[in-house]
Amino acid sequence: MKSLALLHAAELVTLAGPQRPRIGNELSGLGIIRDGGLLIRDGKIDIVGASDEIEEAARDAEVRAGLAVVDLGGRVVLPGFVDAHTHLVFAGNRLEDFERRARDESYEQIAKAGGGIWSTVEKTRAASEADLFAQATKHAEWFVKCGTTTVEAKSGYGLTLDDELKILRVMQRLNQETPLEVVPTFLGAHAVPRDSSAGEYVDLVINEMLPRVAKEKLAEFCDVFCERGYFDVEQSRKILSSAKKLGLKLRGHADQLTNSGGAKLMAELGAATADHLEKTDEQGMASLKSANVQPVLLPGSVYALGSTSYPRAREMIEAGLAVVLATDFNPGSSPTPSMPMVLSLACTQMKMSPAEAITASTINAAYSLNRGGAIGTLEPGKAANVAVFDCEDHRELAYWFGFRQMHSVYVRGEQISF
């Protein structure tokens, strides 16, 4: 039996606590063990405790056989980050959009000039599955280098049956061939194709795309961009209700640009999450709370778009919502795989504490992906997904920004080489 002892963490941030998403003051409970350590056996955490306890357990003959010991040298240790909202698979980039935005051009001006989501759709459609996999593999490596070991990933840059299936198959292959765990979400309803009416495309999503995705088991969740100019509440309800009947769990882009009722719809349908929520009001928050829908907040996209309209994280926490933080990694509005950068934005722009931000990007995110029992904390029986940072205090992760503090990453007990 292969064993690994990780010893002498300055802070072993276990996040041990209730076996459910954390709310209110629970978001601040990190379960820190000073001079902490882990004993890992066959990819899972076996023992968590002070380093001298782990060393004592490691003297057992059965454990000692094949045991590797790593001195962490007084560093901070966390569960691997769980990024619950990304657009991992796409072709190309949006450098022209970025430069135009820097010249203060509007979204509408950029779209008219051939930019926006359509430039990514065209590039993704033109790319082969092999080319998409190669670029996505590079993205996956970026995530792991930032301490992230699990991501949710959405399709949505194909907008035809074949291209959406192509993107989802790339995610399937990423799961098999990279260290990153990818949780696939079907987002066929990301935008209405230029050669289709909204009604025609909704019918295509419901009658052709969703049945194939479900039959081939290519996604766990279905998402919709519920927003004025994309899919309205009624169209979103039709798509998500169809997905639910096919056994898919639900997520939703909601209230990003306008308070259009997206949060209330996610509550009505019993979605796992409502994401973005920049424009959600008190009624929307109350709806999410009553239906136990988790808000996924994406400050990276607010920052990258040059906006100041951040989600009202403090009010959501005070309302008892189990807040999640994620990168929204995508080529247009949030080109970052860095969860530490998102922690910094959460603290400086949304007034979350460093502890709340860590909880929101680990165990709460894991529960939003239906994986709270397997990842997201450092507790016995869970996957040994471990992120080690070159600092001595967990608050440093959000305090220092603009450079990588990563020391090492372990996925299921195996160290990943950078």
Image (spheres, rainbow, N blue to C red):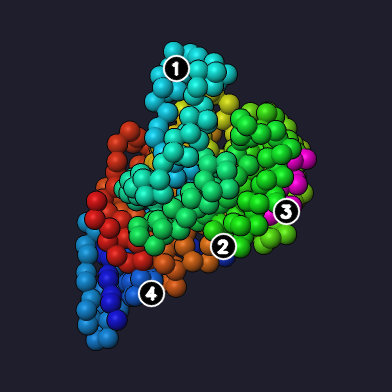
Viewer-nearest of discs 1 and 4: 1
Q: How far is disc 3 from disc 2 in space, using C-alphas? A: 15 Å
Viewer-nearest of discs 4 and 3: 3
Q: Residues within 10 Å of mark 1 (few under 14, many from 20)?
A: some
Check if mark 1's residue and mark 3's residue have beta carbons within 8 Å. no
Amino acid at dot 4: Asp
- Where is mark 1, residue-wise? 100
Question: Residue 181 occupies which quadrant of the picture?
Answer: bottom left
Q: Residues within 10 Å of mark 4 (few under 14, many from 20)?
A: many
- Where is mark 2, residue-wise? 217
Relative to the observer, which residue lies in front, 353 or 193?
193
Q: Secondary structure at mark 1?
A: helix
Q: Is residue 103 above or below residue 383?
A: above
Viewer-nearest of discs 4 and 2: 2
Q: Position of residue 413 (x, y in %)?
A: 32, 67
- Where is mark 3, residue-wise? 242
Relative to the observer, which residue lies in front, 401 or 149?
149
Task: Give the residue at x 44% y 35%.
Answer: 123
Q: Secondary structure at mark 4?
A: strand
Lower sequence index among marks 1 and 3: 1
Q: Position of residue 151 (x, y in %)?
A: 46, 52
Check if mark 4's residue and mark 2's residue have beta carbons within 8 Å. no
- Where is mark 4, residue-wise? 46
Relative to the observer, which residue lies in front, 207 or 224?
207
Task: Give the residue at x 63% y 42%.
Answer: 189
Q: How far is disc 4 from disc 2 in space, using C-alphas? A: 32 Å
Amino acid at dot 1: Arg
Viewer-nearest of discs 1 and 2: 2
Q: Which residues are magenta?
A: 234-243
Task: Give the residue at x 22% y 79%.
Answer: 66
